[in-house]
Image (cartoon, rainbow, N blue to C red):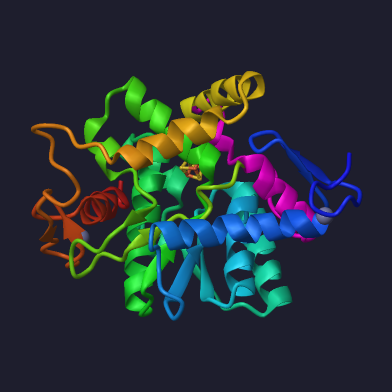
C-alpha cells in the first residue's frame, strides 16, 4: 500500500475517503481534521486558555497533544475516580505524559467532592448506578475546576465513533432533549457554566488510536471495569459493522445530523432551559439545589451509618 500523496509506504488506509497515507501525511490529515472542527464550529479562538479533560485514554491524550502542537495554550485536568487498579493506572499514565511533555496538569481526587468516598463506594452507599453517579461527578468537577482556575473552555476527547453511538442511542430512545444538546460546542448558558468543545468529531476511534501509536503516546488500553456490557459499546459495534459494509456511514449519520440542526416542537432546547444557581454551591442547576450538593448531603448523612 502506497501513500496517495507521496508514494511512500502507507501506514493506514482510510476507507471513508478511500485513501492510504504514510506517517507524515496521516499526521497532516489528522491535524487538518482537528483544525476543521475548530474552524467550522468556532470551538474556541486562538488565544483561548483551554482545559482538556484527560482520562489517560488515547482520545484525551491525543487531543491534548494536538492542541499543544497547534500552538494552543492547553492544560490538562485528570479526575482520580478511585476505581481500583484502573484509576491508579490512568492517573499514573496521565501524570507521566504531562511531565514528559512539560504540560500543566491539575489532578483532582474525587474523594474531595464525595465526602471521602470513591465513585464505586459512593454509588454503593447511595444505591445508584455507578456510571450515572460517575457522569454527574465528572461533569460537576470539570465545570467547577475549569471556572475556578480561570479557563475559557473545556475540551473533551469525544471522537466521531463516540458521537455517532450517542446519537444512535438518543434516537433509539427518542431522547429529544439530549438530541437538541448533542453539539460540538455547548455554549455558556449561565455565569458559572464553562463552554465545552469536542475537536475530535471528524476523526474515528481507529484514526485516533493510529495517531497515538505513531506519536508514541502511552495510553490506558483497558476500558473501565464498569463499562463492561454498556449499550454504547453495542451501538459502536453495530455502527462498525455498517461502516465495514458501507464506508462513510458513520460520518454521514453523525455529520448530516449536525448539519440539519434539528429542533423539536414543544421540547426545551438548551437555550430555553432555565438554569438557576444552586443555593448551596452557586453552580447551575434546573432545581433549587444541584444534584451534586444533594449527593454530598446524603453521603455525609450516610457516612456515620
Ligand atoms: Fe465512570 Fe467507568 Fe462508568 Fe465511565 S465506565 S462512567 S469511567 S464508572
Ligand atoms: Zn505520504
Ligand atoms: Zn450545588
Indicate yes or no whether the magenta region holds residue 270.
Answer: no
Number of labelled discs? 0
Pick the quarter of the image with the N terminus: top right
Look at 31% across and 66% down and name the residue there. 194
Q: Which residue lies at the image location 33% right of the left edge and 76% below the top edge?
A: 148
- Whether residue 113 is visible, yes or no, is no
Location of residue 16 (image quadrant): top right
Instruction: Report the magenta residues as a range.
Output: 205-230
Image side of residue 44 versus residue 105, left or right: left
Q: Position of residue 53 (x, y in %)?
A: 49, 61
Q: Position of residue 199 (x, y in %)?
A: 49, 57
Q: Is residue 79 left or right of residue 298?
A: right
Say which residue appears at 50% left-offset and 28% top-offset. Answer: 230
Q: Nearer the viewer, residue 10 or 123?
A: 10
Query: Relative to residue 255, is residue 154 depicted above or below?
Result: below
Query: Foreground: 229 or 180?
Result: 180
Q: Is residue 137 visible?
A: yes
Question: Within the magenta stretch, is there residue 219?
Answer: yes
Residue sitting nearer the eye, 266 or 128: 266
Query: In the image, 224: left or right of 122?
Result: right
| Residue drawn at x 17%, y 44% as measured from the top left | 269
Is 51 located above or below residue 183 in the figure?
A: below
In the rendered view, tell whether residue 52 sits above or below residue 2: below
Q: Position of residue 159 (x, y in %)?
A: 53, 46
Which x, y percent locates residue 18? 71, 35
Residue 262 picture quarter: top left
Would residue 235 appear left or right of 174 to someone viewing this image? right
Amino acid at each position: 500500500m502506497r501513500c496517495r500523496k507521496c508514494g511512500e509506504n502507507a501506514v493506514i488506509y482510510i476507507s471513508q475517503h478511500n485513501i492510504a497515507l504514510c506517517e507524515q501525511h496521516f499526521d497532516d490529515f489528522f491535524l487538518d481534521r482537528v483544525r476543521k472542527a475548530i474552524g467550522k464550529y468556532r470551538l474556541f479562538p486562538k488565544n483561548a486558555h483551554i482545559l482538556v479533560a484527560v482520562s489517560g485514554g488515547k482520545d484525551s491524550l491525543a487531543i491534548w497533544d494536538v492542541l499543544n502542537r497547534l500552538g494552543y495554550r492547553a492544560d490538562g485536568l485528570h479526575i482520580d475516580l478511585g476505581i481500583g487498579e484502573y484509576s491508579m493506572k490512568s492517573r499514573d499514565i496521565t501524570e507521566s505524559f504531562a511531565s514528559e511533555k512539560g504540560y500543566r496538569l491539575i489532578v483532582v481526587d474525587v474523594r474531595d467532592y464525595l465526602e471521602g468516598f470513591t465513585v464505586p463506594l459512593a454509588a454503593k452507599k447511595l444505591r445508584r448506578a455507578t456510571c450515572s453517579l460517575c457522569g454527574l461527578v465528572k461533569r460537576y468537577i470539570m465545570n467547577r475546576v475549569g471556572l475556578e482556575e480561570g479557563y475559557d473552555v473545556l475540551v473533551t476527547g469525544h471522537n466521531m465513533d463516540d458521537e455517532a453511538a450517542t446519537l444512535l442511542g438518543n434516537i433509539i430512545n427518542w431522547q429529544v432533549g439530549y438530541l437538541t444538546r448533542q453539539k460540538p460546542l455547548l455554549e455558556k448558558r449561565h455565569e458559572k457554566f464553562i463552554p465545552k468543545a469536542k475537536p475530535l468529531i471528524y476523526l474515528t476511534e481507529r484514526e485516533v488510536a493510529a495517531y497515538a501509536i505513531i506519536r508514541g503516546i502511552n495510553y490506558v488500553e483497558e476500558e473501565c471495569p464498569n463499562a463492561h456490557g454498556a449499550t454504547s459499546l453495542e451501538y459502536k459495534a453495530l455502527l462498525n459493522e455498517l461502516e465495514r459494509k458501507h464506508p462513510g456511514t458513520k460520518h454521514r449519520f453523525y455529520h448530516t445530523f449536525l448539519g440539519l440542526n434539528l429542533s423539536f416542537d414543544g421540547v426545551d432546547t438548551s437555550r430555553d432551559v432555565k438554569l438557576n444557581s444552586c443555593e448551596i454551591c452557586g453552580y447551575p442547576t434546573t432545581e433549587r439545589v444541584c444534584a451534586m450538593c444533594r449527593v454530598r448531603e446524603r453521603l455525609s448523612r450516610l457516612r456515620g451509618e
